[in-house]
């Protein structure tokens, strides 16, 4: 009898542990009452031959005098171009040095605080640089020297993947790619992998946020460590590229998971790399002017023998954008025409969402212009 009772207690404890380890997934009904529609307005920024027509990292910025600017990283050339959005004129080039006293190596991305406070992440360097508008490095945070239990790889910050730097008092939140070793991943559960650093500059300590990948993220020898991270209105958001879930937290410790599924693409379907590219949620974007979110969906792409794997990632043949309300409830999904826009190039203003037309597979592509099309947000009458 004692053996049976002991077994029963162990069974209950086991069930309780399993239940506590399984996250609650919030499923909300979709209304599909909203959509994005093309406006007549376009913005064309003329560029010279020194500026690469490829959106690697770009960010809108509103100055204290209410001027609207677009900060644009020219390919991987270490040149940050500043355009006046209203006049469509190039106002400044900030040429960040690779070597020397103000050298940062190869820029991986940036975050604009103001014209003289631009945080820069660098490829393969576990440092965060702060530059001014003259490209002078005025501060460096070398977090490789901070106390840390989990190894923090070189951080990333890019708008086209929504891997944004977050700030809160003395803390800096840095998204980073975990070391990619398939053999290592086979021995690790996806929920145990960490990918956002919590760096305390006062305590000189680097920890990681208590968030990993969904427990079914590794499948069929596919180990995709692709995600997005940003802080918006005090909340932490994680966008999983190959899962319908979005993770949200108010304190970066306790997370809620929302299921946000495209009606046009299945990101759970695995495709052999030789045949093409699987669908993915490439980014989650907050629209602060309309209090909504956009989730970009790259659709499945197969049998494109005339395009490289990089082309399929960079310029997807087809994509859509899911529209979410402030509570991450789906209120619409807009499908965009094939081979027309570059979904890696976008920015948001009071007017709406601007999408880049600088797609080399678009017959109207012009290498001499950064070309953006305005899209307006509409809600259907109920």
Image (spheres, rainbow, N blue to C red):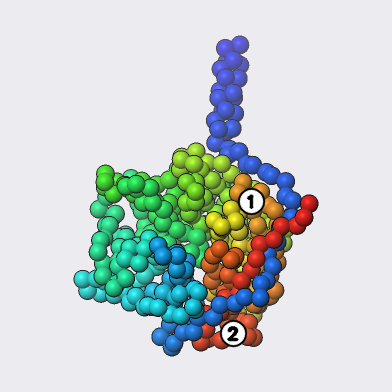
Picture residue at 64% right of the left edge, 42% below the top: 26
User: Does 167 appear above or below 9?
Assistant: below
User: Within the image, what quadrant is residue 320 found in?
Assistant: bottom right
Q: What residue sits 68% from the left and 75% below the top?
A: 338
Is residue 255 visible from the viewing direction of this image? yes
Between residue 304 and residue 26, name the one nearer to us. 26
Give the residue number, with chain letter if any, for mark 1.
325
**Residue, x 50% and y 60% (percent of image)?**
162
> Callout 1: few (<14), some (14-19), or many (20+) C-alpha neighbours within 10 Å?
some
| Precedes in sequence: disc 2 or disc 1 | 1
**At which x and y percent is residue 285?**
55, 59
Q: Do we see residue 284 in this rendering? A: no
Quadrant in the picture for residue 139: bottom left
Residue labelled with disc 2: 365
Q: Does 347 appear above or below 267?
A: below
Position in image of residue 224 (x %, y %): 53, 59
């Amino acid at each position: 009898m004692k053996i049976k009772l002991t077994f029963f207690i162990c069974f209950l404890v086991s069930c309780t542990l399993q239940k506590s380890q399984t996250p609650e997934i919030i499923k909300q009904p979709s209304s599909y009452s909203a959509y994005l529609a093309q406006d007549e307005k376009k913005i064309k920024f003329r560029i010279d031959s020194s500026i690469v027509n490829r959106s690697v990292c770009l960010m809108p910025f509103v100055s204290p005098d209410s001027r609207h600017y677009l900060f644009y990283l020219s390919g991987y050339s270490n040149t940050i171009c500043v355009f006046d959005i209203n006049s469509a004129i190039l106002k400044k080039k900030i040429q960040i040095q690779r070597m020397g006293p103000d050298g940062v190596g190869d820029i991986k991305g940036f975050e604009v605080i103001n014209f003289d406070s631009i945080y820069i992440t660098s490829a393969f360097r576990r440092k965060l640089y702060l530059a001014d508008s003259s490209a002078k490095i005025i501060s460096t945070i070398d977090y490789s020297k901070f106390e840390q239990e989990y190894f923090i790889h070189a951080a990333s910050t890019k708008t086209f993947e929504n891997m944004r730097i977050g700030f809160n008092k003395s803390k800096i939140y840095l998204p980073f790619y975990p070391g990619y070793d398939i053999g290592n991943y086979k021995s690790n559960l996806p929920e145990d992998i960490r990918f956002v650093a919590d760096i305390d500059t006062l305590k000189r300590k680097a920890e990681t946020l208590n968030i990993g990948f969904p427990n079914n993220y590794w499948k069929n020898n596919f180990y995709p460590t692709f995600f997005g991270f940003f802080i918006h209105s005090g909340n932490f958001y994680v966008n999983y590229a190959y899962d319908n879930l979005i993770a949200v937290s108010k304190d970066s410790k306790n997370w809620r998971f929302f299921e946000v599924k495209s009606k046009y693409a299945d990101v759970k379907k695995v495709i052999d790399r030789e045949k093409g590219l699987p669908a993915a949620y490439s980014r989650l974007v907050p629209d602060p002017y309309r209090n909504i979110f956009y989730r970009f969906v790259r659709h499945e792409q197969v049998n494109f023998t005339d395009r490289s794997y990089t082309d399929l990632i960079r310029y997807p043949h087809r994509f859509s954008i899911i529209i979410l309300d402030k509570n991450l409830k789906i209120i619409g999904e807009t499908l965009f025409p094939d081979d027309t826009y570059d979904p890696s190039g976008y920015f948001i203003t009071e007017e709406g969402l601007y999408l880049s037309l600088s797609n080399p597979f678009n017959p109207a592509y012009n290498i001499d212009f950064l070309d953006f099309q305005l899209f307006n947000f509409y809600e259907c009458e109920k």
